[in-house]
Image (tube, rainbow, N blue to C red):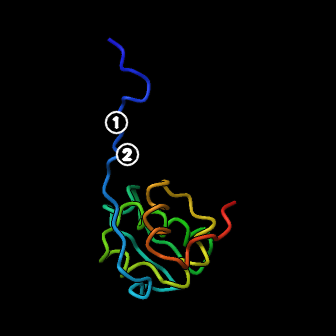
Amino acid sequence: MAEPAGARVRFRDIKPYDAPVSLDELQGPASGMVTLPLRLRWVPGARSYDVGEAGGARVVYQAVLAEGTVDDQRRYLNRDRLIDLWPVLNLDQRVVGLWEGRFLELRGLSWG
């Protein structure tokens, strides 16, 4: 028997996401190499990225926002770098809603 349209529950629709109380808690590096643990970035290999470079920073920030705990966010994310990158990050709408709902600094930034 087929499921009614829209009745399917997807993991991404119920997955819990986390965010700190303040963006000021994000004290991670704004530049240099960052190596993410496998639980944050599910790919084989080194998982090391230069967060001073736009492409590397996008990978790190997308992974940490989607998979990380608040402690991970504090460790790997940088407040000013997040604000700069926010408009170009590819994030689940629930992540966007959580972060923009909590942080006025992210609201209204241009989304491509």
Q: Quadrant where the C terminus lies?
A: bottom right
Question: Which dot marks residue 13?
Answer: 2
Residue 102, picture quadrant: bottom left
Q: Which residue is mark 1?
A: 9
Name above or below for residue 35 compared with residue 95. below
Residue 90, picture quadrant: bottom right
Question: Which dot marks residue 18?
Answer: none
In the image, residue 98 lies at what x, y percent? 43, 64
Q: Which residue appears at 66% of the width and 62% of the height? A: 111
CA neighbours of label 1 inside 10 A, class few (<14), some (14 to 19), many (20+)? few
**Given the current orientation, which residue lies at the most extreme top position?**
1
Name above or below for residue 17 compared with residue 28. above
Q: Secondary structure at mark 2?
A: helix
Q: In the rendered structure, which amino acid carries the disc numbered 2?
A: Asp
Q: Which residue appears at 32% of the width and 51% of the height? A: 15
Q: Quadrant where the N terminus lies?
A: top left
Confirm or deny contact between disc 2 and disc 1 (CB under 8 A). Answer: yes
In the image, residue 86 lies at what x, y percent? 58, 70
Q: In the rendered structure, which amino acid carries the disc numbered 1?
A: Val
Task: Give left or right: position of 108 versus 20.
Answer: right
In the image, residue 54 lies at what x, y percent? 62, 72
Task: Give left or right: position of 17 versus 23.
Answer: left
**Which residue is at the front of the view, 59 or 19?**
19
The image shows a total of numbered marks equal to: 2
CA neighbours of label 2 inside 10 A, class few (<14), some (14 to 19), many (20+)? few
In the image, residue 13 lies at what x, y percent? 37, 45
C-alpha gap between disc 2 and disc 1: 7 Å
**Which residue is at the front of the view, 52 or 102?**
102
Q: Which residue appears at 57% of the width and 63% of the height? A: 89
Q: Secondary structure at mark 1?
A: loop
